[in-house]
Every structure is written in structure tokens, then in C-alpha cells.
Amino acid sequence: MKGFDPKFVDFPDYIIGITKELWEDRQIAKLHDYYGPEIVVRSPASVVVGNKDVIAATMATLAEFPDRTLLGEDVIWCGTPEDGLLSSHRLLSTATHTHAGVYGPPTGVKLQYRIIADCHAINNQINDEWLIRDQGAIVRQLGIDPKDYARDLIAREGGPESCVKPYTPANDVVGPYSGTGNDSVWGTRLKTLLTRLMNAEFEAITEEYDRAAQLEYPGGVRSVSFEGADQFWMGLRASFPRAEFKVHHVIGRDDPRLPPRAAVRWTLHGKHDGYGTFGEPTGAEVFIMGATHAEYGELITGSPKLRREWTLYDETAVWKQILLQTESV
């Protein structure tokens, strides 16, 4: 790990280790060390540039959820310490809504939700990030519909003209990382699957998924098998049937003592002009940043299949875009 603190044995140890230090161990000032001063953090809700805003957001979250944990489920990564490393880090977060904040007055509700963060690191410092938090799961557990949450957030942020604008190509900021991943067969396989689904080749589900596949989707939805995958991907594509699907980053790994895994970051950009997950079509132009992790296995010899999938996007950011274009909020 040339250029990185020698206390970290490898890149996953670095990613998981600094996450715990910063969030759970309250060493927030170390963001000055671990995050670049001009870091670009893109989430579906906004684009943030600079370490100072990241520190402010971190403190606000911990003030609202003081017992928050970030449990690292996997780090799917590529690159070299010399040229830079890219991690796709999947986390299961737990937190109690103890104090007032962006989610409203304290409810005492104990939350559980996932996050996928793609981070570029070099010389012991992260300088580029793509972050997706399952906001739909959070607000639903608090008893709030994602669309209603988005509408209320717009009002609390000062209305349509003043509110924080969701991440789109129009407000993107070019960061230092320009890589597209690696050429592993597992990453290629997941990229091909997602591309086929977005091309309405839904027969790919029975071809690629294990019949007992375990599936985790936005909103904290857990599902299984062919029907679960079909309902999720069909519902998303049906809402945006003509939107442009792009794959931006692909990683595959085949590590000892772990199943073959893949991570794909993708976007869907176009009109909300179909009936599907997001209800009656509105014609609003929507940009969705999504991420998918998958694990493969060979239960039947010679027939490796996708056995576990995690896909995330932020439902509240989608609704915010729709509402800003279709309602007087």
C-alpha cells in the first residue's frame, strides 16, 4: 500500500477502517487528513465540493443520529496504490432517530438501511466520491412517503427556486478520477445483464439469476427469485421507457475465500413518460444515479449464476426532480 498509512493491511482495510474512525469513533477532524480539500462528493441529492462541507454534513448527521453505525459488508475495488484505487463500498447502517434534523422532529425509531459509496483514493486520501444512500428506506421507516418527504424538503429548503438541486449532468463537477474499472469477467457479466434489462431483454433474468437469488432493492425492499428481479427492474424501466441508460464504472473481483463479485455504477436519464414504479407519468426529466453489487456462485457444476444482488438509487431525489417540474411546491 505505497503512499498509505502502514497500519492498513490492504485497501478494504483502509476503506472500512477510516469509515469507522470518522463516524463511529468521532474522529471527525481526520477528514482533513483522509479527504482531499477539494473533494467532489456526488449524491443523488446534491453535488458538494470541498472538505468543509463534508465535515459540516457529517456533524449534522451525527447530531441527529448519535449512535449511527456503518457496517462494511463488502469493498469491491480496482486499481493500484501508485496510480490510484477505486472502491465500491457497501455498508449496512443502523441508527436511532434521537434528535431533530433533516428528517424532522425526533421519533426514537431505530433505522436500518444500506449505502453504496464509490471512492477514489491515492496517497492515503480520498479525492473523488459517488455516494448513494437508501433514503427511501430511511423515510419509510420514519412513517413518511418518499414523495411527501421530497415535497416537504423542497418547502423547508426555501421553495423551488432556493432549494438544493439534485445531482444531474448540469451541475456535475469533474473530479480527478477518470477510470472506468477493470476487465474482470464478473464485472463484464453484470454490466451485460443490466444493459440487457434496460434494453427490455427481461428473459435475461431466468438466464442469469439463480432461482433462489436473494435481492435487496431501494426502499429497504427484500425480494427473491426471478419474480422479484422482474418486478424491480420492470417497474423502474417502465417509468422511464425511453431514458438513456449508461454504465459509468465496472469492477469485478475473484478473491480467495470470497464468492466472485461485481460492482457497477450506472445512470438513467430521460423523461418520466411511462407507468411504473413512479406512478402516473408526468413528463418530467429525471436523472438517476444507481449502483448494483452482485455475488455469483456455482451451486450446479458448470452453471455459475447471480445468487445475491444489491441495487440502490435514491427515490426521494427522483421525486424531488419530478415535483420541481410538475407542482407548485
Image: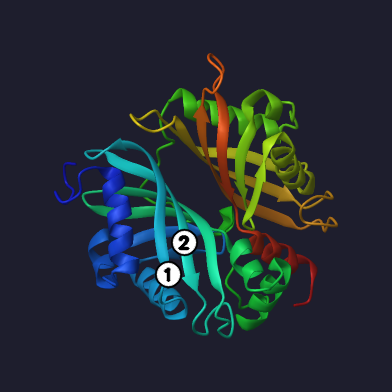
Disc 2 crowd rating (10 Å Cα; few below 14, some 14-19, many 20+) is some
* Mark 2–mark 1 distance (CA, rounded to whole Å): 7 Å
Task: Please give the label number shown on residue 228.
Answer: none
Secondary structure, mark 1, is loop
Identified at 63% across, 73% down, the residue is: 142
> Residue, x 69% and y 55% (percent of image)?
286
Q: Position of residue 63 (x, y in %)?
A: 42, 80
| Residue 130 visible in the snapshot | yes
- The quadrant holding residue 70 is bottom left
Choose between 189 and 72: the one closer to the eye: 72
Q: In this view, does 296 lie above or below 47?
A: above
Counting residues from the N terminus, which is met first, the one under dot 2 or under dot 1? Answer: 1
Image quadrant for the N terminus? top left
Q: What residue type is labelled 2?
A: Ser
What type is the residue that disc 1 sits on?
Arg
The single residue placed furthest to the left in the displayed view is: 6
The residue shown at (41%, 45%) is 74
Residue for point 68% across, 41% down: 244
The reply to whether residue 88 is in sight is no
Report the side of 26 relative to 309 (left or right): left
Q: Which of 53 and 234 is in front in this view?
A: 234
Point out residue 256 in the picture as x, y percentages from the top left corner.
33, 29
Residue bearing the label numbered 2: 93
Q: Residue 303 at what x, y percent from top left?
A: 57, 17
Quick one: SS at disc 2?
A: strand
Asked if the residues shown at circle 2 and circle 1 are in contact, with their CB atoms under 8 angstroms apart, the answer is: yes
Q: Disc 1 designates what residue?
A: 68
What is the tally of numbered marks visible in this picture?
Answer: 2
In this rendered view, identify the residue nearer to me: 91 or 182.
91
The foreground one among 191 and 255 is 255
For the C terminus, the quadrant is bottom right
* Residue 27 location (% of width, % of height): 26, 70
